[in-house]
Amino acid sequence: MTQINPYIQTVALRDVKCHALHGYYPQEQLTGIYFMVDVVVEFEPYGDTENLQHTVNYEVLNTIILEEMKNTQKMLETVVRNIIDRTIASYPFVLTAEVGIRKMNPPMPGQVGLSFVQLKYTAQKTV
């Protein structure tokens, strides 16, 4: 009889502040703007909880975020997808990954506090 793991572990980074040159319009890619990035992953923990190889290292998540934020894209949708894809490649045991990027004070008419793009990945269940 197979025992089911009753635990789901969450590892997250919130409000990672980055200045980056993402944006559809050329001016955004010249001057840049501040962004706040959130990454949340869930997985079934196993083994020794003191072993870094048995978890998602949030230092690695931070490195992925910072590297992808330096890689200028027109669309934030591309950036969130790249962050998720690299996270899943680094940690294939992840069940869900959610990445959100907030563009602080986006350059548009009116007083807009932020714009937001988010993407969620859910692993396919194997039978």
Image (tube, rainbow, N blue to C red):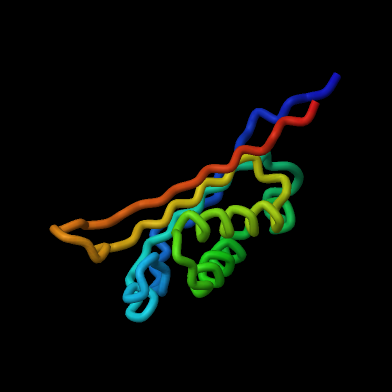
Asked if 96 appears above or below 37 in the picture, the reply is: above
* Percent of width and height locating residue 13: 48, 57
- In the image, is residue 10 above or below residue 31? above
- Residue extending furthest bottom? 30
Residue drawn at point x = 71 percent, y = 56 percent: 89
- Badge count: 0
Question: As drawn, is 72 to the left or to the right of 31?
Answer: right
The correct choice, above or below, for 39 with respect to 62 in the image is above
In the image as oriented, which residue stretches furthest toward the top? 1
Residue 10: image x %, image y %?
55, 44
- Residue 125, quarter of picture: top right
Above or below 26: residue 121: above
Tell me if 45 is positioned left or right of 63 in this view: right
Q: Nearer the viewer, residue 41 or 44?
A: 41
The quarter holding residue 47 reads top right
Name the residue: 83% across, 23% down.
Answer: 2
Q: Position of residue 34 (x, y in %)?
A: 33, 69
The outermost residue toward the left is 110
Q: Is residue 9 visible?
A: no
Location of residue 78 in the rendering, given as x and y in whole percent from the top left corner: 52, 58
Can you name the residue that lies furthest to the right here? 1
Residue beneath the point at 86% across and 19% down: 1
Q: Quadrant of residue 25?
A: bottom left
Residue at the spot 13% in from the left edge and 58% down from the top edge: 110
- Residue sitting nearer the eye, 28 or 9: 28
Residue 70 visible from this viewpoint: yes
Location of the C terminus by quadrant is top right
